[in-house]
Amino acid sequence: MALQWVDVTSEGELAPGEFQVLELDEIVVAVFNLEGVYYAIEDICTHDSEELTGGPIDGDQIICPRHGARFCIRTGKALSAPAYEPVRTFATRVQDGMVQVQLDTE
Ligand code: FES
């Protein structure tokens, strides 16, 4: 396993308020543009493994579509029951016009 920067999309393709999902080595990552800053979280609810990006986004929070737990997109923190564990977060950066996320790859 090694940390590696992986391309998500070009900067112009991910407008504020939008997200993109990337699947790599069995990790599913959702990368969000929140007012021009990129954040990446694992796209799996820590309550019962639902895909978080199927739910609504409310400011910097995403709401699990299954039982309504809220997570902070910036920090991964679980903000409401029934989830108590944070979702995994990943570092992001923009390099040569590409939005990138840092992942552990094999
Ligand atoms: S699976 Fe997300 S709140 Fe239950």
Image: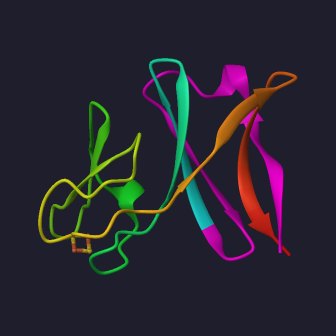
Which quadrant of the picture is home to ligand 1?
bottom left
Which residue is at 40% across, 54% downward?
Answer: 53
Q: Residue 102: give x, y in percent of width and height.
A: 72, 51
Residue lying at the far bottom in this picture: please name it.
Answer: 48
Instruction: Identify the magenta region.
Output: 1-27
Q: Nearer the viewer, residue 23 or 84?
A: 84
Q: Residue 21: within the magenta?
A: yes
**Magenta span contains residue 36:** no
Left or right position of 71 against 4: left
Seen at 35% across and 69% down, the residue is: 45
Which colouring convention does the figure follow? rainbow
Looking at the image, the residue that sits furthest to the left is 81
Q: In the image, is 5 to the left or to the right of 87?
A: right
The count of marks equals 0
**Residue 75: x %, y % from top left:** 40, 46
Spot occupied by residue 13 in the image (x, y as percentages of width and height):
67, 26
Left or right of residue 57, residue 30 in this image? right
Along the line of sight, the residue nearer the viewer: 77 or 70: 77
User: Is 95 placed above or below 29 here?
Assistant: above
Is 43 positioned to the left or the right of 4 in the image? left
Quadrant where the C terminus lies?
bottom right
- Which quarter of the figure is the N terminus placed in? bottom right
Q: Is residue 95 above or below residue 85?
A: above
- Residue 23 in which image quadrant: bottom right
- Residue displayed at 73% across by 59% down: 103
Image coordinates of residue 4 in percent, x first then y, are: 84, 55
**91 relative to 98, above or below:** below
